[in-house]
Structures are given as C-alpha cells and as structure tokens.
Image (spheres, helix red, strand yellow):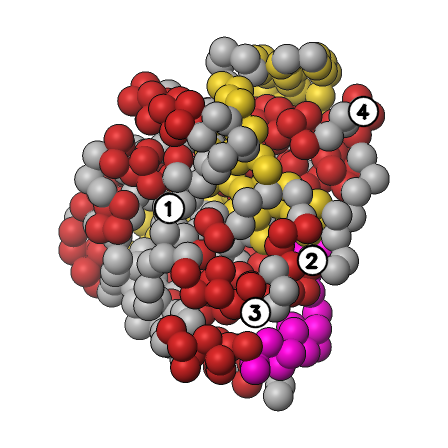
Amino acid sequence: MTYQEALDFISKQGRFAMKLGTERTRAILDHLGAPDRQLTGALIAGTNGKGSTGACLTAILRAAGHRVGFMPKPHLISYTERIEIDGRPITEDEFVRTLEDLMPTLEGITSEMGPPTEFEMLTAMALAYLAPRVDRLVCEVGLGGRLDATNALDLGVAVITNVDLDHQKYLGHTIADIAREKAAIIKRGNRVVTGCEGEALEVVQSQAARESAELWRLGQEIKVESTPRGWDGHVLSVTGPGFAHGDLRIRLVGDYQPSNAALAVAAAHLLDDVPEDAIREGLASTRWPGRLQVIAESPRVILDGGHNPAAMVKAGAALRRLIGSEKLVAVFAMLSERDPVQLLGALRTLSPDAVVFTEPASAHGHAISAETLASVYGPSANVARPARTALDQARGLAGASGNVLVCGSLYLVGEVLSLTDLRVST
C-alpha cells in the first residue's frame, strides 16, 4: 500500500461524513489490547484554543523530559500532522504500516458494528502507533466531546478551553447545550482545568462535581497576567495552587494566547511536578502554525485558521491592534457546513480594505462558491481561483506596505502554507 492508497482507504467513508459516538473507537482499541489504558495525559476540548493549548502543554512536558505524543486536529497540510511524537509527525511509511497492521481489526469491527469513520480510524491509528512509544499523551478533541471518538479515552486530565457557538447542527443551539457536550469529557476522578465563563462554567462545574473531579478555573484558582510584545508574542506570569511562574515568554501572537498558555501550565502541574525551567523552556519553544502566523513580508502575509465567528472576531481584533491603520486585504474561503452570514459578519469586523474570495482545492467541493460569498459580502469583494491566484491578487491590492490575511478555512490556510516559496518564518 502506498501513502496515497492509505489516504484513499481511510477517506472512503467520506472526509466530511460523521457517525457520532465512541462505541466503535472503544471496540477497535479493545481489539488491540486497549493500548490507551497505559497512557496518562490530557484530553482537550473547547470551541477555540484547543490546538494552541495542546501545543504549549506538549512543549512543556517535552522540556520536563517526557516522551510526548500529540494528536492535534485537523491537519493543515498532511494527515501525518495528526500523529506526532516530540514535535515530529509520523512518517508516511510509518503511517502506511500502522494502517496495514490495523486492517484485520478494522475488518472485524466492520462486520460487527459497521465500517468505522475516517476519524475513528485515525484515532485508532494514533493510539496504536503512539502508545508503545510515549509516556504522556496530549489529545485534542474533534467535534464537541461527548460523542467524539476521542472521548473513548480517559487520560486523567481534562481541559476545556472555552465554549462559544459553533457546530450547532450537532452540538445544540445554546451555550449551555454546547457546554454539556464538551464537559462530557470529564470522567470519574479526573483533574480538570477550564477557561470557561458564565453559564458554560456552571455546566463544567456541575459535571466536575458529578464525577468527583478536581477543578481549577482560569481567573479563580489559576491567574494569568500578560504584557504584549507585538509580533514577538507575550511576556506572562501564571499562578495557581502550589505554583507561581513569572517572566514567561511565548511567541504565539494574539491576545487570547496567554490564557491558552496558562491552561497548559495548569494542566502540566496537574499531570506532573513540573520544574520551573521546563515551564519556561516549553512555552518559549512553542510553535503553532496557522494562527496569526506571518509567512511573508512586503506585504506581510498572515495566516489564521480561526473558522468560527468567535475565533475570527478575536483574531481580527488582535490583528488590528498589531497593524493599526495599515492597509488590510483578506483572502477568504469557507466550508458549506458553516453559516456564511455569521462568518462574513465576523469578517467585516476586521474592516478589510478589500476581500478576495476563493475556494481551497483540498475542500473537495465542500466549499461555498467564491461567487456566492462575494454576492453576500457586497462592495470591495473580488473573486479569484485557485488559492495561489487569490493570494497574488490580494498582495497586489495590499501593496508592499500593507497586510494580507488568509482566513475563514483551515483548508485554505493549509493550502497557502504549503506554498513554501513565500515562507519567511514558521
């Protein structure tokens, strides 16, 4: 089997198909001897900030001397990004061998319970590969929490970053409904850290109490103070039960990143007796591509993968504070599963001078057409395909002293990130 054949196999149920529930994942893992049962680590849910929090936590645990597996999602360029050890993705050959070794189990589960989804297969592959090779696991939850395949895992620590409106079709139409789905990752006796507020926090507190789980809350047990350093990130201090760390530095850009870093610091302390130098070194070394990431200059090209209204508004506000009144042109695409009125409303809060709408090829026909988006958006809208052409047009509109923001879809961000001739930083 080649790498492409492996991708074709796991995608045959449809990249965008869903069968919510943990039963098949648990059955596959049990057929493999339950490799996840030997692992400790953190399961991270939330509307936004999961990936950044996971990246910070992974880096801290690595700096503390652990061999760390990381299961981020979705990927930007390659499926191999979803299975990492110590910051290095699985190789394509290892990806293929892992799937081939898993095939007899998948065939058995298919006959008993129906075919597993792509996400269930990827989850099982990650666990099969990582479990014998790591001593800590950081796993980002996919959709929601309660019925996500990753909720078959109990790693001891649960992190819920925040709750906002997203994926309402599957998770519910209120903050409380969505919070209940995400809080369901909290299992009996877990240790929990959360950045939730308001009614979402009330839901998390109730679930933690039901499961006799220790709970640390950002703004209460966990405190963070930060000073922005422009495009160089932030200096911050984080305190909590039994620890206090000052003059910490992170290079992640965005006003919300200190909170994500604080959640990671707290989760690290819930997992281990983490030394000060590991916290400091881990945060300083954290990189998380596609989140207010600058990849080119003259004009400055910035990638941001926030693909729900709350994420786009936060990223846009942070970007405007960084660029002030400088010219801004957006390159925008979005998937058909999302509400264009809501996302385009978030796009308008950035006050772009112009927008170039496009469609990422990797979305395989699941993107809303660029013409449709342009007609909804109105004045200052342009249309260009493919993504490279859209980017070139946006750069021309921005001029050498301006800024281009690529946003709206992780597929678009990944496609532009793969254009390595543009890249000046990672």
Q: Residue at x 76, y 58 (%)?
A: 133
SS category of the residue bearing label 4: loop
Q: Earlier in the sequence, mark 3 or mark 2?
A: 3
Q: Earlier in the sequence, mark 2 or mark 1?
A: 2
Vertical placement of 217 versus 210: above or below? above
For disc 3, the marked residue is 31
Q: Closer to the camera: disc 1 or disc 4? A: 1
Label 4: how many residues lie within 10 Å, few (<14), some (14-19) or many (20+)? Answer: some
Q: x%, y% of residue 370?
A: 26, 62
Q: Please state which amino acid type lies under the numbered disc 1.
A: Arg
Q: Is residue 345 left or right of residue 413?
A: left
Q: Please state the extent of the stretch shown in magenta in the rendering.
A: 83-104
Q: Earlier in the sequence, mark 3 or mark 1?
A: 3
If the image is split into quadrants, where does the N terminus sit? bottom right
Q: Please state which amino acid type lies under the numbered disc 2.
A: Ala
Q: CA distance from mark 2 to mark 1?
A: 23 Å
Q: Please state which amino acid type lies under the numbered disc 4.
A: Pro
Q: Residue at x 51, y 40 (%)?
A: 44
For disc 4, the marked residue is 275
Q: Earlier in the sequence, mark 2 or mark 4?
A: 2
